[in-house]
Image: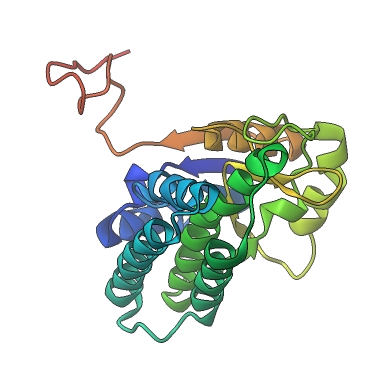
Amino acid sequence: MKVYKFGGASVSTADGVRNLRAIVKDERELFVIVSAMGKTTNALERVFEGVQTGDRPLSMEHITALRSYHRQMISELLRTTDRLEAVDQLFAELEQIATEAQIEVQDAEMWYDRIVSYGELLSTTIIAEFLNVSGVPCRWVDMRRCIVTNERHKDASIDLDASTAPLREAVSGDGAKLFIGQGFIGSTPSGKTSTLGREGSDYSAAGVANILNAESMSVWKDVDGVLNADPRIFPDARHIEE
C-alpha cells in the first residue's frame, strides 16, 4: 500500500482533478488523502463565523458561493450538474446547520469542526465519482468512521491504536485497490466530528501510512519540484535540485 496526499490547491480546478486521475490511475493498492478544494475551508470558516455571531445571511452567502463553485466542478468533470445527489445532501445539511444551529461558547469549537469538515466531504465525493465514471474504480472512505482522535476540537491528535481496526476494515474486502479519503477530519471517541488543525491533511496521510504500514507516503503539490519557499509569497523562490 502507498499513500498519496493532494492538497487543496492541487485540486482547486477541474484540470487539477484530471491531473490527480492521471497520477493515480495506474497505481495498485493506493490510499489517496484529499483536502478541501481551493479556498473552501476559508469560506466554511466564514460560514461558522456567521452562525456563531447570528449573521445568518453571511453564512448563506458563503454557502451559495461554495455550491456554485462545486457545481461548476461537477459540470466540468462529469458534464452534468445533476449527477451527485450526495453533494446536494451535503449542502442541505450545511444549510440546516447555518439556519438552525445555536452555538454556545462551550460548544463553539465542536461546531467549527462540524462545519469546516464539509470541505473535505465535498471534494472527496466529487473526486471519487469522477474517478469511477472515468474508468478508474475506487472506494470512497468516510474518515470520520476510521480516524479516531482525542476530544480536543480544532487541533485533535490521532489515536493510532483506536484507529487501526476501523481503517484496516475500510480497506478490506471486495477487491478494491484504490481508496479516496478525507484529510484533516476524524471523530472523537464519542462520535463527534473533529479536525486535526489547519493544514492537518499531511498529518492524516502520515497517520494512514503508519496504520496501513505503507511502503511510502507522497505529498503532491501544485508546484514543479521542491522549492525553498512558497512561490506565491516569494516570487524569487528557487528549485532545490537535491
Relative height, residue 55 to residue 85 (above, below): above
Where, by quadrant of the figure, is residue 89 drawn?
bottom right
Q: Quadrant of the N terminus?
A: top right
Determine the residue located farthest toward the front in the rendered image: 54
* Res 88 seen here: yes
* Left/right of residue 22 with respect to residue 76 in the rendered view: right
Residue 1 appearing in the image = no
**Who's the residue at 32% across and 72% down the image?**
77
For residue 12, side relative to residue 157 (left or right): left
Which residue is drawn at the image coordinates 57% and 32% (left, top)?
A: 197
For residue 237, side relative to residue 53 (left or right)? left
Residue 34 position, x and y percent, is: 50, 49
Q: Nearer the viewer, residue 84 or 31?
A: 84
**97 to 153, vertically: above or below:** below
Image quadrant containing the C terminus: top left
Give the percent coordinates (x, y) of residue 62. Answer: 36, 58
Q: Nearer the viewer, residue 39 or 181?
A: 39
| Relative image position of residue 74 (x, y in whole percent) | 36, 73
Query: Based on the displayed image, in which of its 4 quarters is residue 55 positioned?
Result: bottom left
Front residue of 100 and 241: 100
Q: Quadrant of residue 110?
A: top right
The residue that appears at 54% across and 38% down in the rendered structure is 201
Q: Residue furthest left?
A: 236
Q: Nearer the viewer, residue 8 or 23?
A: 8
